[in-house]
Amino acid sequence: MLRKLLFICFIFLLSYEGETQLVDSLRTLFKKKYSIDTRLESRNSFIDHELTSVNGVRLGLAFQRKLKLGFGVSWLKTPVSKRFYPQNEFGKIDTVKKYLKFMYLCFYADFVFYKTKRWQLSVPIQLGMGSVWHQQNRVYAFGVEEKKYPVVFYEPGITMQFKVLRWMGAGADVAYRFALQNANKTYVQLSSPSLSFKALFWFDQLFYELFPKSAITKQYGPCYW
């Protein structure tokens, strides 16, 4: 059931109407054995000309390491502040410093279109929905009553990956974050190019290499480039 849901979401995101050959090849790949894809992400981007970092946690499925599909959550890590000038109960203007916060749930897809023993190029896509708001606390405080506004993110990009070992590598991700929001209410522009550098570890491949005769390796392995 989960695989069918991920496949439908992936086809919807790509929007390749009429590309039956591509859809058929993806459907064939989708029937292959899969492994669990887990990752921690940190993307650098700009918010109002300030360099910021957006962290994320991802969990999904990887099919033959050519197609990755899953869900995750992302949030703004960098404390971006802004001054507000509300009127107090005595009719005077106060100065209040608040910090920008946003968090969103997302669906991600990563399709590999070029692969050698060590190099790999892929097209990552993320589609997310969440909220953006300002709060006086620097850290996330969900119990505080702050006005939250909906935001939708769409992040297409390209990823380059180099494998040092079968279970370890490095990569770089270049993307653009499109944000659909009401900037007049959020007082900030969230659309921005993003860049991230990654240290990659495939713990399942490490397990397969360390324990080649285990029952798990015989079922899901072996380790491969």
Image: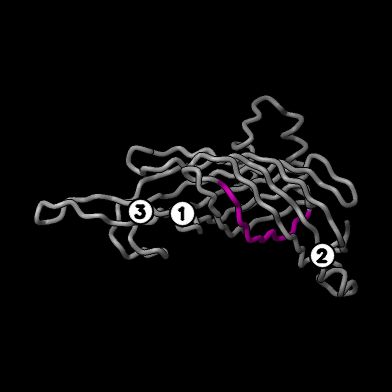
Q: Of callouts 2 and 1, which one flags the residue occurring earlier in the amino acid sequence?
A: 1
* Vertical comparison of 163 with 213: above or below: above
* Mark 3 crowdedness (10 Å alpha carbons): few <14, some 14-19, many ≥20: many
Distance from Cα at disc 3 to Cα at disc 1: 12 Å
The magenta-colored residue range is: 33-45
Q: Position of residue 216 (x, y in %)?
A: 81, 70
Closer-to-camera residue (43/165): 43
Q: Position of residue 183 (x, y in %)?
A: 38, 38
Dividing the picture into quarters, in which one does residue 12 lie? top right
Q: Pick out the residue farthest to the top.
A: 18
Rendered-image quadrant of the C terminus: bottom right
**CB contact under 8 Å: marks 2 and 3:** no
* Mark 2 crowdedness (10 Å alpha carbons): few <14, some 14-19, many ≥20: many
Q: Does dot 2 land on a helix, a strand or a loop?
A: helix
Circle 3 or circle 1, nearest the eye:
3
180 relative to 82 in the view: left or right: right
Circle 2 or circle 3, nearest the eye:
3
Q: Which residue is label 2 attached to?
A: 205
Q: Does dot 3 land on a helix, a strand or a loop?
A: strand
Assign the magenta stretch its main secondary structure: strand
Q: Does dot 1 land on a helix, a strand or a loop?
A: strand
152 relative to 18 in the view: left or right: left
Distance from Cα at disc 2 to Cα at disc 1: 32 Å
Q: Which residue is label 3 attached to?
A: 134
Closer-to-camera residue (30/210): 210
Q: Position of residue 25 (x, y in %)?
A: 78, 37
- Give, as a three-letter code, the residue at label 1: Met
